[in-house]
Amino acid sequence: MTSMQAPLLLTPGPLTTTARTKNAMLHDWGSWDGDFNALTARLGRRLLSIIDGGDNYACVPLQGSGTFAVEAAIGTLMPRDGKLLVLVNGAYGKRMAQLTAMMGRRVDVADFGETSPVDPAVVRERLAADPDITHVGVIYCETSTGILNPLADIAHEVAAAGRKLVIDAMSAFGALPLSCRELAFEAVVGSSNKCLEGVPGMGFVLARTDALEQAEGRSHSLSLDLHDQWRYMSRTGQWRYTPPTHVVAAFDCALDQYEEQGGQPSRLARYEANCETLIDGLAAIGLRSFLPSSIQAPIIVTVHAPDHPNWNFTEFYRRVKEHGVILYPGKLTAVETFRVGCIGAIDSGDMERGVAAIASVLADMGMQTN
């Protein structure tokens, strides 16, 4: 599925894309042109259909990375006198808490460490103990480790306590199940360059329309004001400021392929096969994945580095890259790891190629592990 000239990106995004998606960027678009406005509207409808959004949710696209969209969602949807409880078990939960504090909003953290999923019972206890909490933020798949958080149980506790849930689904959206018919949430945040296999440059927030209607004047930022972006797009069909036109076109093309391939169930099945191939292949060469299978999302796998004096990630990375494979550094604080992504326009054969490159490099570096 990958081009012979392009590296194989075994990362959590940006990731390997199809030639068809790349080719969609060869056409230039006028940012205020009616055809581009129609493209934006169609893209929004397609994203909403993935969560069964219907008329109760609106899609608000935003220029920039997924973090831009997370900050926009928190800054727009949470009242200035509100309080956010962030459920943290990795770097991206910590980032959500950090950006909330930097915009001057009240924030509290429930930290579950780097090896455990969020415990819904703790969420229930924290919400019962602090009536000031208005919103809860959670990372569906914590990309720094690959932990899959129990979203349905978390959403149940938040709804039962009468609070509002904001889901960072950056590394989950389009692959892991997520429907507003099955669980309650105020908003879900995603981006173009993850499981939907577009290119980077556009985030999006799928938010309840009643929440957007109440959000006027809340944002701390002009460019990150989702309410203003939503109102302007509803009125004119246009983005407020220069849109990433080529990114939008590539994303729409990626969604064509997503739908043709069978949507969320098929995307998840391919990623699960990739993950299984990867973990089995790593085990065969003596490398251990960091997480137990019960909490491992089929998105990215954290791998224990070899316990060997010759280990040097920078040198390991460089040599694997010479084989045409791009890996990802670890993001844990307690142990030495590296990460291998399972997402993108790749299949099990690509995962086998990645494992072969890793095995070859370890042997060349004098770290035969089995």
Image (cartoon, rainbow, N blue to C red):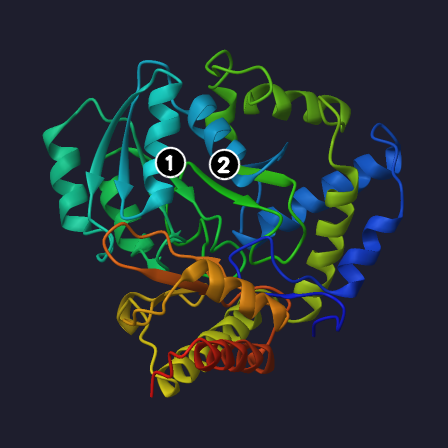
In this picture, residue 90 sits left or right of residue 319? left
Q: How far from the left and from the top, in percent, is residue 17? A: 69, 61
Q: Of label 2 and label 1, which has the lower sequence position?
A: 2
Of helix, strand and loop, which one carries label 2? helix
* Vertical position of residue 187 compared to residue 356: above or below: above
Q: Identify which residue, 226 or 94, lies in the foreground.
A: 94
Q: Quadrant of residue 122?
A: top left
Q: Position of residue 275 (x, y in %)?
A: 45, 74
Can you see residue 159?
no
Disc 2 to disc 1, C-alpha distance: 8 Å
Residue at (36%, 14%) from the top-left corner? 80
> Which residue corresponds to mark 1?
95
Discs 2, 1 touching: Cβ within 8 Å:
yes
Above or below for 276 versus 151: below
Q: Residues within 10 Å of mark 2 (few under 14, many from 20)?
A: some
Against 45, residue 17 (above or below) is below
Q: Which residue is mark 2?
A: 67
Q: Seen in the image, is 324 located left or right of residue 154?
A: right
Q: Residues within 10 Å of mark 1 (few under 14, many from 20)?
A: some
For the residue marked with disc 1, what is the amino acid?
A: Arg
Q: Is residue 304 left or right of residue 318?
A: left
